[in-house]
Amino acid sequence: MGERRDAEGFDLHVKVLGWLVLLSGLFGVMAACCLLFGMLGVATTADERVPRVILPIIGLAMSGFVGSLSAISVAAGYGLLRRRPWGRALALVDAFLGLLWFPFGTIFGLYAFWVLAPNRAAAYFARPADDLDGL
């Protein structure tokens, strides 16, 4: 009875973490789009030639960086929710990168390490995901 209860609790932690990672990644993608369009908007209102050329380049570089990191989060969240072994590995990489985004990334990263690092997580993700009853 206690082992089943622990398994259900662990499954809940993985689902919560999966949704947190997925939603934070989607917000990051939206932020990257807003950043790009914001920089393009500012560039179009500039009176001088240099800002009109430089601001879109800076916006593209910054939004590409944020969008790439956010895409990792989206993929990791999806992998966690579908209980894929690559999702666990990608979520650990995402958690490590998120430690630098104080304070929320640090909190999510520590929670991800707490959920995904133990040996029980490896066994959980090694089981076939055919018996998934939905997200």
Image (cartoon, helix red, strand yellow):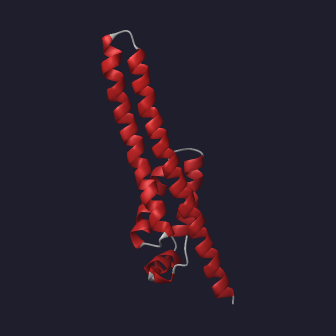
Q: Position of residue 47 (x, y in %)?
A: 38, 9
Query: Vertical placement of 70 versus 131: above or below?
Result: above
Query: Vertical placement of 96 versus 82: above or below?
Result: above
Query: Vertical placement of 76 versus 12: above or below?
Result: above
Q: Position of residue 114 (x, y in %)?
A: 57, 65
Count of picture labels: 0
Residue 62 in the figure: left or right of residue 124? left
Looking at the rendered image, the quarter that the C terminus falls into is bottom right
Q: Going 57% across and 57% down the picture, which residue do you hit?
A: 20
Q: Is residue 109 visible from the viewing direction of this image?
A: no
Residue 22 in the figure: left or right of residue 57? right
Residue 95 in the figure: left or right of residue 44? right
Q: Position of residue 128 (x, y in %)?
A: 44, 83
Query: Vertical placement of 90 versus 45: above or below?
Result: below
Depth order, front residue of 44/81? 44
Q: Is residue 54 visible from the viewing direction of this image?
A: yes
Depth order, front residue of 42/119? 42
Q: Position of residue 97 (x, y in %)?
A: 45, 51
Looking at the rendered image, the quarter that the N terminus falls into is bottom right
Q: Quadrant of residue 55?
A: top left
Q: Going 31% across and 14% down the picture, which residue do you hit?
A: 50
Which residue is situated farthest in the bottom direction here?
1
Depth order, front residue of 98/42? 42
Which residue is situated farthest in the top direction here?
47
Q: Going 46% across and 63% down the picture, which residue do you hit?
A: 78
